[in-house]
Image (cartoon, rainbow, N blue to C red):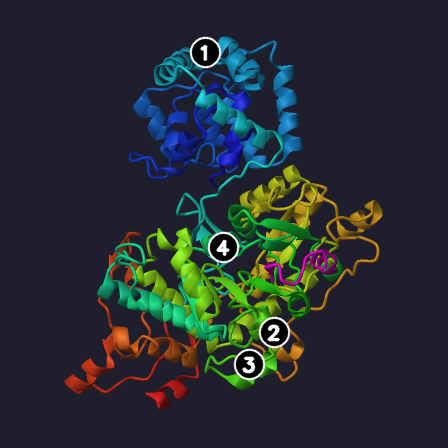
């Protein structure tokens, strides 16, 4: 697997790594060699080293592709022969900093790497290669590997000459390096793995090498809607009719019927008069809060201490005063609201689901305080839309579950409901809906003011029509099908219970988030690397500044598409990694006094989920069945029909088997086009062809096909 972290950690051990820019290393390690497809470009270069060749041959199963892709014996031998390289007698891994770094990265544990470094230092007096492996880049260039000595000196001279030619004043490159060094020293440097989710194998993805597949356990595509068949079908149809790009900003050429229809769909979802779509919810939050705060005279923001960065930035950009209250602490919020006259414009900004700890905001109670003290409520439902409520409108809808079930799909407000009492709702299309984009929903006047004044909306190119159509299809589908939300909750409960039974410190919370406390940045990174490298399980480590120092964690997202076998394997793997890295368990945190609500005296070890057994379908036996390996995921036929129907006026009516894919993988591993079988209802009637019943889709199990036949 490609891991840039493995490269960066060993820059001090290798002259080549030390003098090469991180961006260059990333490109080399993620690009395939044109001559040897099984190797990365970096691997091909590494084989020029007489010692790296045998290292790749003998330890191919241990070498991580972040430094040099795992090479087959045939490919390495082929390169050696073509380059005329003959490894010296007695060559070992320890003799070359390239090979030692690769082996250490494969082990993915700092303690083993340190042991290997100690072993190399003990040999330093006897062999120049070993000395170079433990020296600084400067020392290595002076007394290190003779194969790199000349190249290192030439590169140093070239870099100095280039820097002098570019700048005679401030040393910008040195500044960049110093800032990055700070990140490395405090362990907050971010590493980006090359993960490519496979539409027909969700939740499986391949890494930089297409043959290396892993299970994804941290994606925010919470329901797998990124590859839902009717979503993909809609996007294909839209792409065929409207092309790729939108053509400009909304006020020039990018204000299409698809965009307006999506905004109507979202307004209906939240039972609000209007909605406005942005390029992302980060932009939606930033643009809206900065505009409101700058326009409202003397505005004061009251911000939850755990609010997302987009909200914090928006408030900062507004120039308005910002008062921070303790997370979900109503007493602290009220004590701060009391300090300002009721006539002072005030906005309480908070979230429904806090994504890193899994807590849920007290929405109803905050609305009570807002009404009492004359404040607006700004609710971020980013990690809740699609996941809570009978139609997927979020936690505010979920709190009046039965009332919204009774109200159906008409989109009219329910006076006095929690969602109706919230003034401004923001959400995303890039998580549970599996697309991209963000939005706001509220009164017509509010939305029109943001549309007219917010630079983040006005001066940004509009989202592509196919993307917008896919998002709308996803929203429409989830409005008519609750089964994905129910099954997700069942799977989340299963994983949380299994981890808790093994003393794994799950941070307690009532939501779908499964955060596991590690409490150390290096251990969190090592655990993530170990899960990926040894178990083919991808979960990203969450470190500062996303979470507080000392509260580092692994954040798991369980979807309805994860199978029972995958969940069991995940829990076993996490348990094994915690043991091998000696990471604190729940019992350890209790002994230490606790941290991040884990093992803290007086804090509950278990919090009841917001979804009740009745809402999940456990009580009446309607709960969806957990998938097993080989099972086809369920796609609801009624919801498919509903999602198709909202596009009748723009794309035409359509019946028959849903075709999600326009390509297929051929026998040679390439991708080829498939002749479309999509046929509109009007075309079939003209030709006299009988209209078929919606049938089983490839890779998915259709439900309620008889109902679809009746509606046709």
> Can you give x and y, in whole percent of width and height, for residue 335 in the image?
75, 58
Calculate the distance from the C-alpha at mark 3 to the C-alpha at mark 4: 30 Å
> Can you give x and y, in whole percent of width and height, for residue 31 in the image?
36, 37
> Can you give x and y, in whole percent of width and height, for residue 167 in the image?
38, 18
Q: For residue 338: magenta?
A: yes
Q: Residues within 10 Å of mark 3 (few under 14, many from 20)?
A: some
Dot 2 corresponds to which residue? Answer: 418
Dot 1 corresponds to which residue? Answer: 146
Q: Is residue 703 left or right of residue 254?
A: right
> Can you give x and y, in whole percent of width and height, for residue 356 in the image?
62, 53
Tell me the quarter of the image containing the C terminus: bottom left
Q: Nearer the viewer, residue 708 or 204?
A: 708
Dot 4 corresponds to which residue? Answer: 295
Q: For residue 653: magenta?
A: no
Calculate the distance from the C-alpha at mark 1 to the C-alpha at mark 2: 72 Å
Q: Residue at 39% of width from left, 72% of height from top?
A: 264
Name the secondary structure under disc 1: helix
- The answer to the question of whether label 1 and label 3 lie on touching residues, with beta carbons closer than 8 A, is no
Q: Residue at 35% of width from left, 52% of height from top?
A: 460
Name the secondary structure under disc 3: loop
Residue 186 sits in which quadrant? top right
Residue 414 - label: 3
Calculate the distance from the C-alpha at mark 1 to the C-alpha at mark 3: 77 Å
């Amino acid at each position: 697997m490609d891991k840039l972290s493995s490269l960066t950690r060993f820059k001090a051990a290798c002259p080549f790594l030390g003098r090469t820019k991180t961006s260059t290393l990333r490109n080399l390690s993620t690009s395939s060699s044109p001559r040897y497809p099984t190797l990365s470009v970096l691997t091909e270069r590494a084989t020029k080293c007489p010692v790296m060749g045998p290292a790749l041959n003998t330890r191919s199963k241990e070498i991580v592709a972040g430094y040099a892709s795992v090479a087959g014996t045939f490919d390495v031998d082929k390169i050696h022969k073509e380059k005329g390289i003959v490894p010296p007698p007695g060559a070992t891994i320890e003799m070359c900093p390239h090979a030692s770094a690769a082996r250490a990265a494969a082990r993915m544990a700092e303690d083993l790497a340190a042991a290997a470094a100690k072993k190399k230092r003990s040999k330093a007096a006897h062999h120049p290669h070993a000395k170079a492996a433990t020296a600084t880049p400067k020392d290595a260039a002076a007394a290190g590997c003779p194969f790199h000595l000349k190249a290192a000196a030439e590169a140093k001279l070239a870099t100095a000459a280039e820097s002098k030619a570019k700048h005679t004043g401030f040393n910008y490159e040195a500044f960049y390096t110093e800032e990055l060094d700070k990140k490395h020293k405090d362990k907050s440097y971010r590493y980006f793995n090359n993960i490519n989710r496979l539409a027909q194998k969700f939740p499986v993805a391949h890494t930089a090498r297409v043959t290396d597949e892993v299970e994804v356990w941290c994606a925010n595509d919470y329901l797998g809607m990124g590859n839902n068949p009717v979503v993909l079908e809609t996007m294909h149809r839209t792409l065929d009719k409207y092309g790729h790009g939108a053509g400009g900003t909304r006020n020039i050429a990018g204000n299409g019927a698809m965009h307006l229809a999506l905004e109507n769909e979202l307004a209906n979802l939240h039972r609000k008069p209007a909605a406005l779509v942005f390029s992302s919810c980060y932009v939606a939050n930033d643009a809206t809060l900065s505009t409101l705060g700058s326009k409202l005279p003397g505005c004061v923001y009251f911000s939850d201490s755990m609010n997302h960065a987009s909200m914090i930035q928006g408030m900062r950009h507004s120039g308005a005063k910002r008062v921070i209250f303790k997370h979900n602490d109503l007493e602290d919020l009220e004590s701060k609201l009391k300090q300002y006259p009721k006539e002072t414009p005030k906005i309480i900004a908070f979230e429904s689901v806090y994504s890193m700890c899994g807590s849920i905001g007290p929405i109803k109670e905050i609305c009570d305080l807002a009404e009492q003290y004359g404040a607006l409520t700004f609710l971020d439902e980013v990690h809740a839309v699609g996941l809570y409520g009978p139609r997927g409108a979020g936690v505010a809808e979920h709190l009046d579950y039965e009332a919204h079930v009774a109200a159906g799909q008409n989109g009219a407000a329910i006076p006095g409901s929690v969602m109706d009492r919230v003034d401004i709702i923001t959400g995303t299309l890039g998580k549970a809906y599996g697309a991209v984009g963000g939005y706001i929903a509220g009164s017509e006047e509010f939305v029109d003011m943001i549309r007219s004044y917010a630079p983040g909306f006005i001066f940004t190119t509009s989202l592509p029509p196919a993307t917008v159509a896919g998002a709308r299809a996803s929203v429409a589908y989830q409005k008519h099908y609750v089964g994905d939300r129910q099954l997700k909750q069942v799977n989340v409960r299963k994983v949380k219970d299994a981890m808790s039974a093994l003393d794994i410190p799950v941070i307690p919370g009532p939501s779908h988030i499964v955060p596991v406390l590690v409490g150390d940045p290096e251990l969190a990174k090592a655990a993530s690397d170990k899960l990926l490298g040894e178990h083919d399980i991808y979960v990203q480590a969450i470190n500062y500044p996303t979470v507080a120092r000392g509260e580092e964690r692994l954040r798991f997202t369980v979807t309805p598409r994860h199978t029972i076998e995958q969940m069991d394997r995940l829990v076993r793997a996490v348990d094994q990694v915690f043991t091998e890295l000696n990471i604190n368990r729940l019992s350890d945190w209790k002994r230490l006094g606790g941290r991040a609500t884990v093992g803290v005296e007086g804090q509950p070890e278990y919090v009841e989920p917001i979804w009740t057994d009745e809402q999940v379908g456990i009580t009446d036996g309607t709960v969806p069945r957990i998938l097993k390996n080989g099972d086809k995921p369920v796609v609801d036929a009624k919801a498919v029909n509903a999602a198709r129907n909202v596009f009748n006026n723009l794309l035409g009516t359509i019946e028959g088997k849903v075709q999600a894919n326009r390509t297929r993988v051929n026998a040679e591993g390439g991708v080829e086009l498939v002749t479309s079988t999509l046929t509109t209802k009007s075309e079939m009637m003209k030709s006299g062809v009988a209209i078929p019943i919606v049938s089983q889709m490839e890779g998915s199990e259709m439900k309620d096909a008889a109902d679809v036949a009746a509606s046709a």
